[in-house]
Image (cartoon, rainbow, N blue to C red):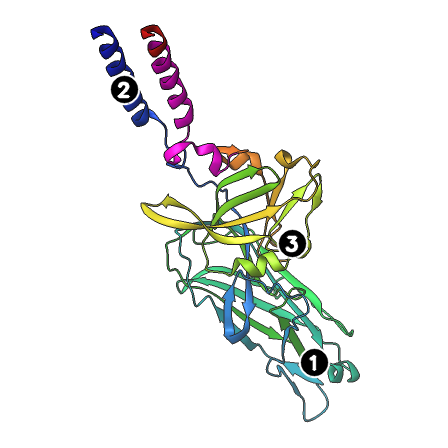
């Protein structure tokens, strides 16, 4: 009898110690993410943001910059031109994460010569000046002047102008940094510019560690992942536009064709970043094909159109960022009291208990 009591006490002590030794699979999951190009789009109200409208039918904003040419009243010199401001676009809502920055810096703008300009006898011969400012400091500057190249777009649809510099003068941007771009042009004819829709994503791109990935989870036919972004954008726009999507068996899922309720966009896990606790965003897809190789799925992340040369999508294998217990795990697998492994420990304890009861009989 005495030995039985001692054994049961030891078993209870084993159970108590095991509860404390069970690892917390949700703790200390690190955020990952390398530097990649992010595109800041010129938006309405002179805003600047990586967000792109998910509605691909939304019309672009069209503006006519101030006229930059003058006709020689004598008729001898024809037209002369001078530099005019196109405008300044500023990221009103600053970055919420500390960023590392690097080049190249890629400027782009969609434009065309106006119908009236195409009817006159002058070629536009457009040239641009672009400047990226970070907290009021000159971070990058590009102009066509030195190259001597000029541009024409005498057609019904806009053309894309691009300019690139290899370096950026500022290597870091703490939380709350203000980014803006200044644009100038000159031309021998009237032009119009286009921006702020899916097709005409005028703006600037540079490399930054602005996107951080948390953990992914694969459970049956459901795949999810967490992410944190430096600028406050609406992830629904990126999902609606298929900029953030899942690639399964080499085919990108169309988010609009997901079963009702999917993809799910919600708050994800909390992560530690630069000493601050931050709540991630979680996106969950449902894969209809039960034979698909879901464990080989790829998360394709972008905030702009997939064909963008300035900021191509970031592709991450779901298994590369899988969280602890992230394959096949579900709420039912966590055991009693929500503790993973508790059922196994309880089973061992029960076997010990039953074995001694049988011995007493």
CB contact under 8 Å: marks 1 and 2 = no
- x, y percentage for residue 224? 54, 44
Badge 1 density bin: few <14, some 14–19, many ≥20, Cα 10 Å:
many
Return the residue at label 3.
255
* Residue linked to disc 2: 12
Is 225 in front, or is 209?
225
Which image quarter holds the C terminus? top left
Residue 149 visible here: no
Q: What crowding class fits label 3: few (fewer than 14 Cα within 10 Å), some (14-19), or many (20 or more)? A: some
Q: Residue furthest left?
A: 2
Q: Position of residue 14 (x, y in %)?
A: 29, 18
Query: Who's the residue at 27% across and 14% down the image?
Result: 8
Earlier residue among tags 1 and 2 = 2
User: In the current view of this chain or complex, which residue is farthest to the bottom?
Assistant: 73
Q: Is residue 170 magenta?
A: no
Among the two numbered marks 1 and 3 on one chain, the one whose residue lies closer to the N terminus: 1
In the rendered structure, the answer to whether residue 171 lies left or right of residue 240 reads left
């Amino acid at each position: 009898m005495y030995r039985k009591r001692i054994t049961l006490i030891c078993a209870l002590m084993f159970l108590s110690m095991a509860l404390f030794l069970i690892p917390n699979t949700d703790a200390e999951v690190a955020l990952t993410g390398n530097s990649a190009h992010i595109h800041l789009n010129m938006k309405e109200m002179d805003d600047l943001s990586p967000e792109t409208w998910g509605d691909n039918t939304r019309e672009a904003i069209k503006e006519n910059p101030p006229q930059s040419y003058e006709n020689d009243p004598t008729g001898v010199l024809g037209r002369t031109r001078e530099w005019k401001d196109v405008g300044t676009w500023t990221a009103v809502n600053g970055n919420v994460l500390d960023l590392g920055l690097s080049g190249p810096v890629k400027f782009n703008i969609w434009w065309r010569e106006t119908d009236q300009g195409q009817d006159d006898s002058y070629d536009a011969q457009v040239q641009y000046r672009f400047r990226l400012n970070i907290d009021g400091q000159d971070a990058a500057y590009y102009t066509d002047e030195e190259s001597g190249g000029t541009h024409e777009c005498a057609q019904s649809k806009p053309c894309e102008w691009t300019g690139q510099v290899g370096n950026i003068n500022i290597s870091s941007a703490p939380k709350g940094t203000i980014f803006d771009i200044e644009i100038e042009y000159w031309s021998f004819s009237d032009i119009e510019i286009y921006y702020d829709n899916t097709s005409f994503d005028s703006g600037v791109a540079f490399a930054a560690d602005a996107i951080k990935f948390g953990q992914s989870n694969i459970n049956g036919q459901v795949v999810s992942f967490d992410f944190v972004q430096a600028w406050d954008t609406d992830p629904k726009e990126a999902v609606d536009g298929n900029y953030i999507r899942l690639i399964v068996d080499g085919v990108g899922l169309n988010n609009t064709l997901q079963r009702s309720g999917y993809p799910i966009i919600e708050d994800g896990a909390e992560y530690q970043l630069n000493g601050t606790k931050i709540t991630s965003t979680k996106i969950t897809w449902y894969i209809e094909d039960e034979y698909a190789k879901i464990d080989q799925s790829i998360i394709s992340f972008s905030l702009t159109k997939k064909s963008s040369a300035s900021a191509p999508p970031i592709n991450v294998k779901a298994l590369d960022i899988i969280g602890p217990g992230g394959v096949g795990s579900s709420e039912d697998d966590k055991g009693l009291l929500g503790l993973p492994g508790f059922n196994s420990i309880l089973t061992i304890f029960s076997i010990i208990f039953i074995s001694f009861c049988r011995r007493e009989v």
